[in-house]
């Protein structure tokens, strides 16, 4: 089976973990501070605050921007549910704007239509490693004096017109095991706003600026030096791994685009897509997905149900009609693109997709 994802943890990460264990300093120590500094540099940001997960990063970011009861946060319906749930956590209401059909990211035209006097922030999701249309989103945010909180949980190292994703507002990253880099579990907030950074640091650590002094209500959402040690090693490898992902994606697209019915992913002009997921549109998606699995190709569906149609949100009274997101949820299929794939793996993926769709071989070799 060719796995849809493969976390890469090697001897360097293992050695880094042992070094932390032997040091005796395992939580909120020097490794965490160094990891934060290096991560902020990658994003072109002044501050980085490490957290226990991407979800807690989003939660803290909204609280740090003082978003709460009665406020509205405009976000995408086509994402992992945490993108919207973070608004519910703070008592705000997520408002869904439909997505762009070519890029699966939130449509700025639809954002404009959903702004009300209660709107406090825009939370764009850089889905699959593809940057949102940040020029248009920045214009809207400036015009209406709205905060931007980027969900960059799938976009480590992505760029928009030469500028790192994560540098346009406050941004949140996931460091879960399947992401382009991992600390096994963890998250990161980056921002250029010193006040937001200060509030975030307090919120993740029981509202405590110093040991046993608590100046505000906070949470235990810290990370560990063990996680940070892994992250520091992984950061060194990120550029190379992202380059391999792009090469793999280009090879897949070159061949899969020849198969009738397959729509390969588009890359926004001037942007650097880091292909956390390589996601195509495919006919009869669910049946095709099972045939691919049966043929030895691991696949994923990101995401089979838009957030506004989840039982939780239906129970909260959401009845939005968001046709582009709803259509995407019936058609998208993610194929393996991770750096561990070999040329034979890529050819096998291409040939298996062709076989599933009853198409002749498109490679210069016999069909498997």
Image (cartoon, helix red, strand yellow):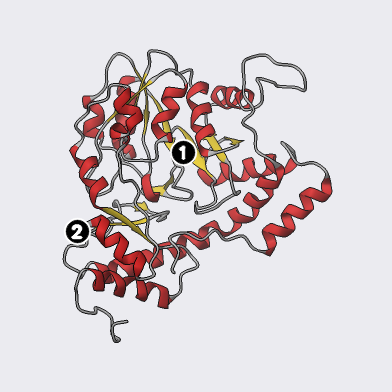
Decide which of tag 2 and tag 1 comes sooner along the chain: 1
The quadrant of the rendering that contains the C terminus is bottom left
Mark in front: 2 vs 1: 2
Q: Is residue 303 above or below residue 8?
A: above
The Cα–Cα distance between marks 2 and 1, rounded to whole angstroms, is 37 Å
Q: Position of residue 30 (x, y in %)?
A: 74, 41
Q: Nearer the viewer, residue 312 or 243?
A: 312
Q: Nearer the viewer, residue 225 or 193?
A: 225
**Residue annotated with mark 2:** 283
Q: Nearer the viewer, residue 118 or 290?
A: 290
Q: Nearer the viewer, residue 180 or 3?
A: 3
Q: Position of residue 226 (x, y in %)?
A: 70, 46
Q: Position of residue 325 (x, y in %)?
A: 24, 41
In the displayed structure image, the side of residue 19 where residue 119 appears, left or right = left
**Residue annotated with mark 1:** 167
SS for callout 2: loop
Residue at x 40%, y 63% (from the top left corner): 298
Q: Is residue 333 above or below residue 173?
A: below
Q: State whether residue 221 appears in this view.
A: yes
SS for callout 1: loop
Q: State whether residue 161 appears in this view.
A: no
């Amino acid at each position: 089976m060719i796995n849809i994802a493969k976390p890469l943890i090697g001897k360097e990460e293992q050695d880094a973990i042992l070094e932390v264990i032997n040091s005796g300093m395992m939580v909120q120590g020097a490794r965490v501070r160094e990891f934060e500094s290096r991560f902020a540099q990658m994003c072109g940001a002044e501050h980085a605050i490490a957290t226990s997960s991407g979800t807690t990063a989003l939660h803290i970011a909204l609280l740090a921007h003082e978003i709460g009861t009665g406020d509205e946060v405009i976000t995408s319906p086509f994402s992992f549910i945490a993108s919207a749930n973070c608004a519910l956590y703070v008592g705000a209401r997520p408002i869904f704007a439909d997505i762009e059909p070519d890029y699966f990211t939130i449509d700025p035209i639809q954002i404009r239509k959903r702004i009300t006097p209660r709107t406090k922030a825009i939370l764009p999701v850089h889905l699959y490693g593809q940057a949102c249309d940040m020029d248009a989103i920045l214009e809207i945010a400036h015009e209406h004096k709205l905060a931007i909180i980027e969900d960059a949980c799938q976009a480590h190292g992505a760029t928009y017109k030469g500028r790192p994703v994560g540098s346009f507002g406050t941004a949140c990253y996931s460091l879960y095991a399947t992401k382009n880099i991992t600390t096994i579990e963890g998250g990161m907030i980056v921002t250029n706003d010193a006040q937001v950074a200060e509030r975030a640091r307090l919120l993740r650590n029981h509202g405590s600026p110093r040991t046993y002094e608590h100046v505000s209500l906070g949470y235990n959402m810290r990370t560990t030096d063990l996680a940070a040690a892994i992250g520091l090693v992984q950061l060194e490898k990120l550029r190379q791994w992202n380059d391999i992902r792009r090469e793999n994606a280009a090879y897949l697209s070159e061949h899969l685009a020849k198969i009738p019915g397959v729509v390969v992913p588009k890359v926004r002009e001037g942007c650097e897509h880091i292909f956390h997921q390589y996601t195509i549109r495919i006919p009869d998606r669910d049946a095709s997905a099972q045939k691919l699995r049966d043929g030895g190709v691991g696949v994923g569906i990101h995401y089979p149900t838009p957030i506004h149609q989840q039982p939780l949100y239906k129970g909260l009274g959401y009845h939005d009609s968001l046709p582009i997101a709803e259509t995407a949820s019936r058609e998208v299929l993610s194929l393996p693109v991770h750096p561990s794939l070999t040329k034979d793996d890529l050819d096998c993926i291409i040939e298996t997709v062709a076989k599933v769709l009853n198409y002749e071989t498109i490679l210069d070799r016999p069909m498997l």
